Image (cartoon, rainbow, N blue to C red):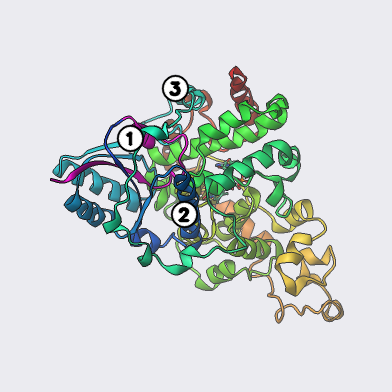
Amino acid sequence: MKQAVNIVWLKRDLRLTDHQPLFNASLSPLPVILLYVFEPSLINAPDGDIRHWRFVWQSLMDIEQKLNHLNQHLTITYGEVIPVLEELQKEFKIVNIYAHQEIGVKITFDRDKAVASFCKQHHVKFTEFQRDAIQRGRKNREQWDEQRLSYLQEPISVINWNRIKTIEAAKINARNLIPEEIKHSHPDFQIGGSTEARKLLDSFLNERIYQYMKQISKPKQSRTGCSRLSPYLAWGNISMREVIHAIANHPVKNNKRMVSFWMSRLQWHCHFIQKFETACEVENQNLNKAFDDVRTEWNQTYFEAWCEGKTGYPLVDACMRCVKRTGYINFRMRAMLVSFLTHNLWLDWKKGAVFLAKQFLDYEPCIHYPQFQMQAGTMGVHIIRTYNPIKQSIDHDPDGAFIKEWIPELSLVPTPALFQPWLMTEIEQKMYKCVIGKDYPFPIVDLKLSANHASTHLWAVKKTKIAKEEGQLILNKLSSRKNDQALLPKTKRSTKNEKQDLNFKLF
Ligand SMILES: Cc1cc2nc3c(=O)[nH]c(=O)nc-3n(C[C@H](O)[C@H](O)[C@H](O)COP(=O)(O)OP(=O)(O)OC[C@H]3O[C@@H](n4cnc5c(N)ncnc54)[C@H](O)[C@@H]3O)c2cc1C
């Protein structure tokens, strides 16, 4: 007679608190297998990188440490999910599988559908719970904002660990198959796990938030001035509701302007994921079909120069080298990297999106792909923005400290020559030990000409009837009813958002 069990299947919800699948499992008298599966198909997917799986491993170790104190168990295995479930079926009678809905790329969506049909076939009840405030199957944003707010304000269900008995499914435990490099930490990256997430949130609310508005756009200062919570939200080490509750219980909430500025970013998090849920084709198709005929030619040399941080534009190259090495760069610099790729180099966004997905430790497909398309101008509903890397350097890295940190070739070059090193005379190049064309590349394209070319072409398409019609459909489907005209957050709009988010003083 097989032992009856419930399974709690962990995916991008790597925490033990505010966890509806675990909470539901705690209500049943059946023992629980708390399961994480390292799936080779995801590990080897084009958008996956070792840094992501290291973060996942660290998150699981953090969970396991907490479980050890509770005398509970985590089962970690390696393999595709269906064979793992088949293996479990041989030993146990699986009654329920509880999981969160994973709003994500096609490969995970197809995997979840396969799990659903496995469950149907084997008479297992598969219950998927809502992720944060994201609603599956929505066709538009009618009433979404109100529902999002009320979801986030609901009390957090506390799990009674005395009522759960987790058992280890020892036969499927395959930790030895997990690539060793995943298990080794790396000093250049943030460390995964809810414990780290909590520490970071505390330090942000206690101190760092006071610098946030000043430092958000600066590539160097944003590394401490921004919350840096993104990988923890992306991999589910902390839920959005937990973040919102932490703010509501912290004295900093009285500093309304500052807090609502940050909360509007948190709000975008949910907005973008909801957008992806409604239009998942954003992963690999232009959302606005009118843009299918622009950027049809590919230039591999340009692409490689961008990927390697060797475009000849110091801020672009510094940002790329920094994100490759550390997994993080701030929002404005991400937007500039995409602008340079798609506008100045006039390359299609798709390969670049996959490349940066691998670099971002906080890779969240539902934010990443819509953001990429917004910056590339292929939604056709926003202002087309081309960032000038020289201006961005002067505005946000005026002493050149960030550029010098990431481009040692330029470390002796003083400002303002640092921002346009190709303008240095031969004598200056020798003096500062940086010969352009030898130590550091000439600019790969002319900034002004390439920006004008992009702007002319994109605006011409944007004005066509088909682009406008497609744009209207996108707005109807993806933007909030309260604020139909804008997907792109603007100053005016954030004022409105601020008002909404101040509703949290309800707490
Ligand atoms: C091309 C491009 C790709 C991006 N890809 C990702 C991605 O894969 N994962 C990801 O989490 N963010 C992505 N972003 C959004 C943004 O750059 C990061 O969320 C932010 O830089 C993370 O730093 P932080 O945690 O210190 O943010 P904070 O400024 O402290 O903001 C707090 C949280 O709000 C959310 N947030 C902040 N800005 C945005 C935004 N513009 N859109 C949506 N949510 C936001 C994030 O969850 C973030 O952790 C992308 C932006 C661009 C332009």
Left or right for 384, reference 239:
right
Q: How many labels does the image show?
A: 3
The residue beneath circle 2 is 56
The residue beneath circle 1 is 25
Q: What separation in Å lies between label 2 and label 3 (alpha carbons)?
A: 34 Å
Number of the label disc, if any, that sits on residue 16: none
Circle nearer the N terminus (2, 1): 1
Foreground label between 2 and 3: 2
Going by the numbered disc 1, the residue's amino acid type is: Ala
- Counting from the top left corner in percent of width and height, residue 318 is at 68, 64
Going by the numbered disc 3, the residue's amino acid type is: Gln
- Counting from the top left corner in percent of width and height, residue 349 is at 49, 57
Q: Which of 179 and 139 is in front in this view?
A: 179
Q: What separation in Å lies between label 2 and label 1 (alpha carbons)?
A: 22 Å
Against 323, residue 263 (above or below) is above
Going by the numbered disc 2, the residue's amino acid type is: Val
